[in-house]
Image: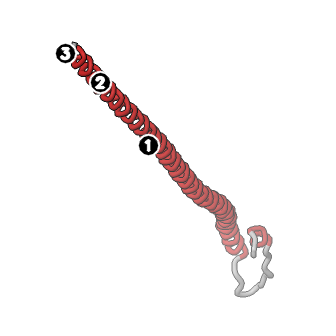
Amino acid sequence: MITPLDIENKKFSKQMMNGYSVEEVDDFLDELTVDYSRNYKEVAELKNKVEELNNSLVQYKTIETTLQNTLVMAQSTAEEVKNVAKQKADQIVEEAKGSAQKQVDELNSQIIMKQKELDDIKKQFDIYKAKMEALLISQLELLKDINKDEDKV
């Protein structure tokens, strides 16, 4: 690439006849050097700007990748937390069912025991009633015998 310094230092051979005016060529080369210098600087600045933008783009792509990875990780963590919570909820429900069933079984056992006690008491009452009835009958018989004996006397 030609630099502004190359344009400035360019020398042309001089011809005596039908040649260009040295002064006009020098003036034109001076103008060309100024414009070319300005363009050269602008191109260099734009190249730097493009390089900076590319670096920023790489940085933003890295950030984007990091954010995507973070989002995926957050989603998987949320899913894992949800699964753990569901497992714990299921476990609590199962424990509650087990506890409730145990209490039901205990209550049924107590009901059976109380029913047996009631049956035993009923039997004892029936036995007591039969004994009392037998006692009353024997006492009645005894009274009848006494009344008969008194009537004879």
Query: Which comes sooner in the sequence, label 2 or label 3?
Result: 2
Residue at far front of view: 153
> Which image quadrant is residue 2 in?
bottom right
Q: Which residue is mark 3?
A: 151
Q: Nearer the viewer, mark 2 or mark 3?
A: 3
Query: Which comes sooner in the sequence, label 3 or label 1?
Result: 1
The crowding category of the residue bearing disc 1, from other C-alpha atoms within 10 Å (few below 14, some 14 to 19, many at least 20), is: few
Q: Which residue is mark 2?
A: 136
List x then y, in percent, for residue 148: 22, 19
Examine the rendered structure and indicate whether residue 138 appears above or below residue 107: above
Decide which of 112, 130 is in the foreground and name it.
130
Decide which of 150, 59 is in the foreground and name it.
150
Looking at the rendered structure, the secondary structure element under dot 2 is helix
Q: Marks 1 and 2, how far apart in space?
A: 41 Å
Question: Could you tell me which residue is drawn at 62 percent across and 60 percent down?
Answer: 69
The crowding category of the residue bearing disc 3, from other C-alpha atoms within 10 Å (few below 14, some 14 to 19, many at least 20), is: few
In the image, what residue type sits under mark 1? Asn
Decide which of 104, 140 is in the foreground and name it.
140
In the image, what residue type sits under mark 3? Asp
List x then y, in percent, for residue 136: 29, 24
Q: Which residue is mark 1?
A: 108
